[in-house]
Image (tube, grey):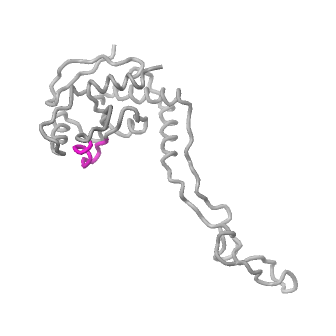
Amino acid sequence: MLEVDVKNSHNEKMGTVTLDAQVFGAPVVPELLHEVVQMQRASMRQGTAATKTKGNVRGGGKKPWRQKGTGRARAGSTRSPIWRGGGTTFGPSPRSYAYSIPKKKARKALFSALSSKVAEGALVVLEEWNFSEVKTRAMIRLMDKLALSGRILIAVSQKEDDLVRMSGNIPNLKLIEIRNLDVYSLLLNETLLITQRDLARLVEVWGKS
């Protein structure tokens, strides 16, 4: 049985919660995680690299000299790739690098990433959000009390304005909605912070077959 401590805002243990074995007890498969991360990173690429072919370069419409009789090599345009100032032969053009993998495979990878967080002791379950003020310093204080450092990912059911306002200016702190949870974000951040209520929501959203 997988269990994790539930902490309050003072880092005191308030109890334990049993984790769903399907979501948090899956085998950690590095090869699968790598494949999904590569897919996500490819989708992030802008794909705006571009060069001009001889048809795109300005000028070069007139044949530089007649075809025969000059002793020179024949040439049809001064914008040929072999000329200085000419076009590029096989240069890049704008394209999308995005591709997809089967949904079942992606879901399995997400479970693998979540399970790795549990195995590393990097899943922190908070009893509830409890702030005396809607200030960035209140969020920083909470992170200090929970002894969290490095990159932190906070998973929420919905991005409430107060949480967005409190976390927006903190480096290495990212807020993500549970429905948008992804492998790359989980692996990029050292700690996953989630409330007990949102943990149940995570299982409800992703645990269904």
Picture coordinates of residue 145, whole percent (x, y):
15, 35
Instruction: Confirm whether the magenta stretch covers residue 166.
Output: yes
Q: On the picture, is 35 further left or further right than 206?
A: right
Above-or-below relation of 3 to 52: above
Q: Which residue in the rendered view is the most extreme toward the left?
A: 132
Q: On the picture, is 37 further left or further right than 175?
A: right
Q: Which residue in the rendered view is the most extreme toward the bottom?
A: 70
In the image, what residue occupies the spot 50% across and 50% down? 45
Location of the N terminus by quadrant is top left
Q: Viewer-proximal residue, 71 or 168?
A: 168
In the image, what residue occupies the spot 17% across and 20% down? 14
Picture coordinates of residue 172, whole percent (x, y):
29, 45
Q: Viewer-proximal residue, 70 or 46?
A: 46
**Image label count:** 0
In the image, what residue occupies the spot 41% across and 30% down? 113
Q: Which residue in the rendered view is the most extreme toward the front?
A: 161
Above-or-below relation of 190 to 67: above
Q: On the picture, is 46 further left or further right than 88?
A: left
The magenta segment is 164-174
Instruction: Confirm whether the magenta stretch covers residue 69.
Output: no
Image quadrant assignment for residue 165:
top left
Above-or-below relation of 149 to 116: below
Picture coordinates of residue 164, whole percent (x, y):
27, 43
Picture coordinates of residue 99, whole percent (x, y):
57, 41
Q: Which residue in the rendered view is the most extreme toward the right?
A: 69
Image quadrant assignment for residue 87:
bottom right
In the image, what residue occupies the spot 79% across and 84% down? 65
Q: On the picture, is 47 further left or further right than 144?
A: right
